[in-house]
Amino acid sequence: MDSGRFRTPRTTASATVPGTARDRRARASRTARASRTVRAPRLAALAAAGLLATVVPSAQAGAAEPVPRIDLTVLVVDDGGSAIRAITAELKGSGVPYRTLDLNDENRPVLTPAFLSEPADGATGRPRARYQGVVLPHEAAFGPDSAEHAALVAYEKAYRIPQVDASTWAHPGVGLDYTSDGGWSGVLDGARAHVTPAGQAGPFRDLRGPLTFEDNDPDVAESYGYAGRPRAGYTSYLDMPAADGGRISLVGEYAHDGRRELVVTFAYNPHQRQFRVLARGIVEWLTQGVHLGQSRHYLSVHVDDVLAPDARWDTVRDCTPGDLDCPGGAGEAGANPIRMTADDAAHAAAWQKSSGLLLDLVYNGGQGEQWKAEHGGTDPLAARLIADRAQYRWINHTYTHPFLGCVQDAGTVPWSCAKDASGAIRWTSRAEISAQIRDNLDWARGKGISVDRTELVTGEHSGLRTLPQQPVDNPHLAPALADNGVKWTASDNSREPAQRSVGSGYGAALTVPRHPMNVYYNVGTAAEMTDEYNWIYTSRADGGSGVCESDPASTCLPAPLDPATGYASHIVPREARTALSHVLANDPRPHYVHQSNLAEERLLYPVLDKVLADHRELFAANTPLVNPRQRDVGAELNRRTAWETALAAGQVTAYRVGATVTVKAPAGVAVPLTAPEGTRKQLLLGTAAFGSPYAGTRSAWTTPEPLQSGITLRLPTA
């Protein structure tokens, strides 16, 4: 069935950090040593500062001068390093518009006063700042004595524009003592840092306080940084203990010469947890809490094949009976399939209540009826789930879980699409697809189970294109979806990460990509899970399949995992880390597993428990997990696509003048907006509270009110 079993670690080179000659020589030596061993992703992090959540700055000029217009766009100066990639990914992922200035492009625009701003025009008398914030690779990206650096400094002073120094080193030029003066530099793997009271009161109000740098491999240096003692004008937001008992800073705000810089003194990449945890605060500091885009922490878990049995991994043949490529399987699921019991169902209900996370049961009613018929006419599992039906969300998974694409020809390995006498592909019919959808809905309604008919998960995501055998959708799928009112059908994110239409025309269903979790559908015990994991991720010399050797995107284990301990010690933390990385990246896509993962040794719970525990440890109560259902995820992805399209086409105008924000977008396009607490939205008559609270700010997808052509927000002022 729909198993998502392959997940490949990413590797990213570390960023280059400037320094003194002594620091550079030391770093070069360390880098030479590390380059022989480093495989894992290199460093991450940033921090944010000086977020004035209730104060919106106006022009620093005298009261008689006009308040400038500041466009809600960020300027990113890109040197190709991993730190800039990380910040750019955060801006893009949360919907914040930005412009990139590529330092490696010989034909790039020159940064001049005219590039950055416009003088006052005749209509409003207001000057215009084109960028609300600037991101540099480090504080001297253009050279400290260059005309471009001078233009940027003048711009930031004139309009009070914040600047992020994405990755630098500790020195007086950024408000810190040298590391030789009571500071520290070195590998940060496993280091325990802490968000300061100033950070929690400012841009990092979403964080609980402690932050441990990742240490995924004790034999690999993954993070490197510099921590220095703050000087006058520097406010630390993330620090660590010094050898003498004081505190030394890794992230902070340096206010000097009429400018503000967010200084980050460690290297990182987009995937490391320390960056992902700090990323939201960096954007809030950079934009002073007022920006287009919004971000949430989403976590939904779909449990597929509920009421159906799942075939069990054969540890002798290293395959799954029933799979077409399993010798001797003869298409049968085997004599010992995995299926939840009534006790497993009771445990699931109790776990939901204690954890606060609602599961989505993706069910096959016909499979349950078949099980009951084959087992004396009773099914304690179905009885327990039906009794607890109101405690779950339910999603249609078709009645008996057939493959709904082309008719599969099992005479070849891998299978191929069967063809008729004329050579045309044979497809599952529209009538059969419709019957599978309709009969499963009718079964649920007959049991008093509430199901949203607009949501569907087909068995193995079948009917949708399946490469390489079936490069197109079953042409009968879209009509069958329309016949049954399906608007949101699941797809596999590992195959199709982008949302798309199924069919064409108004009202066509849209896909909802789901993340497969590496807790396999065909295992009930930790030993079985580890055995299959070893088969996939070890070399032939170590007894594995060698897939990890032939696939350039994969990585082999250095040695097979111990069947007795490998699941808990290696697989659980790795899979929990992957799932949490999706959560922290503002990714609403659901994760999916199978009912077998709630059965026998109940392998799913340790993974989810760790995700939930890690999130609670990192984030304050104002930043809860959001648990959307499938239709809500589909709508969120659809809004994002429309928003990104409008931005790319230059159809969005957004700016701030003092305490007023104005946004205009194409009709029908919802706008994601984030603003401080206390912000109000202008109505035709009066105002109303804007958005909903999240992470210490307020945000929402919003549109103009009736009879209005744009959106106007009134920001709080001090």
Image (cartoon, helix red, strand yellow):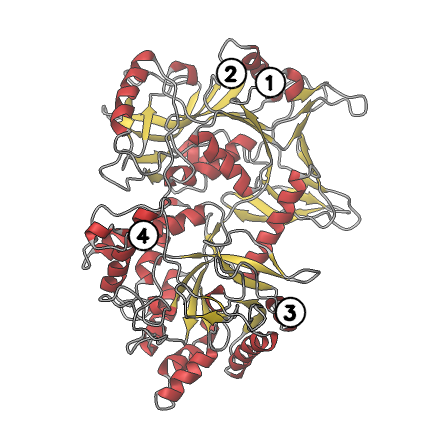
On screen, residue 453 versus residue 682, left or right, reads left
Q: Residues within 10 Å of mark 4 (few under 14, many from 20)?
A: some
Nearest the camera: 400 or 182?
400
**CA separation in Å, label 4 and label 3:** 39 Å
Label 2 vs label 4, nearer the camera: 4
Q: Amino acid at mark 2?
A: Phe
Q: Residues within 10 Å of mark 2 (few under 14, many from 20)?
A: some
Q: Quadrant of residue 425?
A: bottom right
Sequence-first tag of 4 and 1: 1
- The label on residue 111 is 1
Residue lying at 55% horizontally and 22% vertically, measured from the top left: 105
Residue lying at 41% horizontally and 77% vertically, measured from the top left: 385
Vertical order, 122 against 492 (above or below): above
Element class at badge 1:
loop
Please name the residue that numbered disc 4 is placed on.
547
Quarter holding the C terminus is: top right
Q: Amino acid at mark 1?
A: Leu
**CA separation in Å, label 3 and label 2:** 57 Å
Element class at badge 3:
helix
Label 3 vs label 2, nearer the camera: 3
Residue lying at 48% horizontally and 61% vertically, measured from the top left: 469
**CA separation in Å, label 2 and label 4:** 46 Å
On screen, residue 690 versus residue 332, left or right, reads right
Q: Are marks 1 and 2 in contact (CB under 8 Å)?
A: yes
Q: Amino acid at mark 3?
A: Pro
Sequence-first tag of 2 and 4: 2
Q: Residues within 10 Å of mark 3 (few under 14, many from 20)?
A: many
Please name the residue that numbered disc 3 is placed on.
479
Nearest the camera: 27 or 497?
497
- The label on residue 142 is 2
- Residue 182 visible here: no
Residue 510 in the image: state x and y as whole percent.
60, 59
